[in-house]
Amino acid sequence: MMKVNKRINFFDCDPAGIIFYSKIFEYCHSAYERMIEEFSLQENYWNNNQYVVPIIKAECEYYNPVKYGDEIEIILKITELRKSSFEITYELFLGERKFAKVKTIHVFVSKSKFNKIDIPEHLVSKFRDFSSS
């Protein structure tokens, strides 16, 4: 599990001053990037010769509006770890109130053939550290 804080910028909002719906995905991806940084990998996760890790599914449930200037907290957990893919669940809070929940599924594929491959073993153990179990 990992927690990331974010202040809502004016440019993140629609004309009503409420966070624009797609910005949630940017916030969550930023938290995902922070998680990968925590791994302190020798190779470059984002640009290497062996694999890429596309997101194959993304969904979001919105419960309450969030506005310009609000301070939010994103809690990221790896909620499912499979042979070649993993699922991340993000819960977004404004104070004690959960205002959104996001899920993304990521799959490892060979960079040369773009076919599914097993998650490299050294990453499996790192992903387990961010598991909700």
Image (cartoon, grey):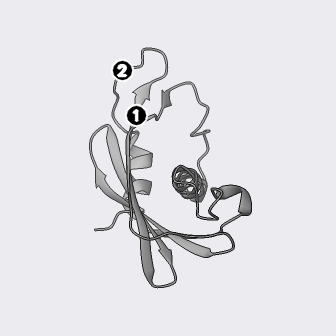
Residue identified by numbered label 2: 115
Furthest residue to the bottom? Answer: 96
Give coordinates of residue 10: x percent, y percent.
72, 62
Q: Which amino acid does label 1 sit on?
A: Phe
Q: Which of marks 2 and 1 is nearer the N terminus?
A: 1
Task: For label 2, count other residues whose C-alpha is less than 10 Å away and answer few (under 14), some (14-19) or many (20+).
Answer: few
Q: Which residue lies furthest to the front in this view?
A: 16
- Extreme top residue here? 113
Quarter of the image with the C terminus in it = bottom left
Q: Which residue is drawn at 34% across and 50% down?
A: 87
| Depicted 41 relative to depicted 27: above or below | above
Label 2 – label 1 distance at C-alpha? 8 Å
Q: Is residue 113 left or right of residue 68?
A: left
Residue at numbered disc 1: 108
Give the residue drawn at x 40%, y 34%: 108
State the image coordinates of residue 78 (x, y, percent, origin top left).
37, 58
Instruction: Give residue 131's position: percent from left, percent from top.
Output: 35, 63
* Kind of element beneath mark 2: loop
Q: Residue 83: where, in percent of width, then height? A: 27, 40
